[in-house]
Amino acid sequence: MAFNEYLINKRGRLTWCDEAAFGDGGDMANNGILVGVNAMIEPDFDENWQEILTAGADARTVENKVVGPLTLPFTLSFTMVEWKFLKYLGYSFTNTGGPTYTHTGTLQNAVQSFAIEWAFRHTTSVVISLVGCFAKGGTISFQKSTGEGTESFVKVTMQCMAQDYTLGSSVTSVSATTRTPYQFRMIKATLDNVETVEVNNGDITIDQGINEDDSRYANNTLNRKIGEPIPLTHRITGRFNVNHKASTHFDSWATDAAISNCSLDFIENSSTNKLELDFSGFRFHKVFPSMDNTSVTNSDLVWSALSFSGIVATDTLGDY
């Protein structure tokens, strides 16, 4: 009896690399790295068929369809092992030091594009190569863990678009990562210069203000593809779910003003592996809990910040 070898996601792999110019595909063979660990992709690719309702035939059916604008949106999610991906969310980095390096981020007015190789490894592999990729925004999320599994890890979710794709069968050789994933126990939230220990879960979202339709043109050279993304207003928002032991956060909300000395740090090792995010113009939007007679008093502290007054990663990687 003959059996078939199926494509299984466990054998799949996602790698990415910078592009030197939008849509050029980068150099995956020399610069490609894994997209974190436990990486997943959820595509929503569409040919956007255009209907020819009638061409003269005596029929109520649609007579034909032709391809329309190519759209290649996808959601990318992965577990954190380093912070390079922040350059796809609007930041460029200067790199100093060694063998432990400090990477200091600065917000840019243009977007760094990247290429992705989505490989289904198999006796005859299936490879989807995406070029001209860019992130419209991304969320870093975490939650406390009380048992086995994967919920302990810090997770990144990015909303992305690609300009074009190819289908092939050649998988680029890229080394597996040996770095340790970040976990919930590495979080340090500081609000109004006081560390808030009682954080149950939370997230921070960076939105680049990109509407891909702004980059769709009536142009023969681009044909069905979109052009370069145009970032507009950059926004930073987030949420911390906390257990309340006093009126501290209610009082901060009631000041009706920005709160100084607020930060969010991810600390795998305080001297060699960490990310420090310092906020400017930090404000609470919602803080109050609902009344529940059966549980600890907790609530989501919903907040926003105008910008990062500091964004600094530390690790052993020489270049971001």
Image (spheres, rainbow, N blue to C red):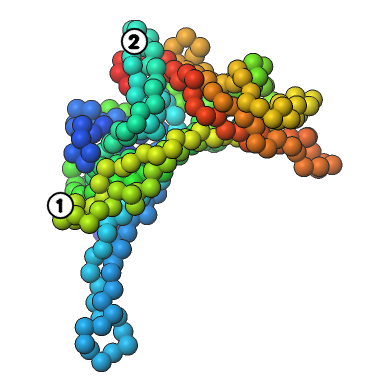
Residue 126 shows in the view: no
Q: Is residue 249 above or below residue 223?
A: above
User: Where, by quadrant of the figure, is residue 178 drawn?
Assistant: top left
Which element carries disc 1, helix, strand or loop?
loop
Give how far across and how far down residue 286 sits, in percent: 68, 37
Residue in view at x 21 percent, y 41 percent? 23
Q: Is residue 106 above or below residue 304?
A: above
Q: Is residue 218 above or below residue 310?
A: below
How many marks do you count on the picture?
A: 2
Q: Residues within 10 Å of mark 2 (few under 14, many from 20)?
A: some
Give how far across and how far down residue 183 sits, in percent: 53, 26
Identify the residue under disc 1: 221
Give how far across and how far down residue 297 sits, in percent: 78, 35
Give how far across and how far down residue 175 sits, in percent: 27, 27
Identify the residue under disc 2: 96
Q: Earlier in the sequence, mark 1 or mark 2?
A: 2
Find the residue positioned furthest to the front.
Answer: 256
As shown in the figure, which amino acid type bears the numbered disc 1?
Thr
Residue in view at x 61 percent, y 33 percent? 303
